[in-house]
Amino acid sequence: MKGFAGQIVRVLHPSYCAMMMVTGIVSIAAYLLSMVAPAWVLFGLGLIAYAVLWILTLARLLWYLPSALFDLTDYTLGPGFLTIVAWAPGQ
């Protein structure tokens, strides 16, 4: 993969997964505070981000495996992969 898209996939930071946690937490908080419209907007953004992040992560594993393995074993970047467990909607 080359070009701008390839560069994005190659340098994808593992902590982008935390965006799923944030959209979920804020969406639930908004819903509990009776802000239904913002809650659904955040939920929708979270679903879109979920799909995009999985596509980018799988592309990174497919085309840039050494870079992904380096991030996984690096003590500063590796903990970012722990946020993957929070990806699944409805957790």
Image (tube, rainbow, N blue to C red):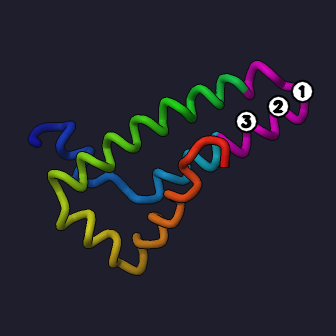
| Dot label at residue 24 | none
Residue 39: x and y in percent read 74, 28
Horizontal and vertical percent position of residue 66 = 17, 67
Which residue is tagged 3? 27
Q: Judge the density around disc 3: few (<14), some (14-19), many (≥20) Cα neighbours within 10 Å.
A: many
Residue 50 screen position, x and y as percent: 48, 39
Instruction: Give the amino acid type for the residue marked by disc 2 in the picture.
Output: Tyr
Magenta segment includes 28: yes
The answer to whether the residues at label 1 and label 2 have Cβ atoms under 8 Å apart is yes
> Secondary structure under badge 1?
loop
Quadrant of the frame with the N terminus: top left
Q: How many marks?
A: 3
Q: CA distance from mark 2 to mark 3?
A: 6 Å
The amino acid on which the numbered mark 1 sits, given as a three-letter code, is Ser
Which residue in the protein does label 1 denote?
34
Badge 3 or badge 1: first in the primary sequence: 3
Q: Which residue is mark 2?
A: 31
Q: Main secondary structure of the magenta part?
A: helix
Q: Is residue 21 above or below residue 37?
A: below
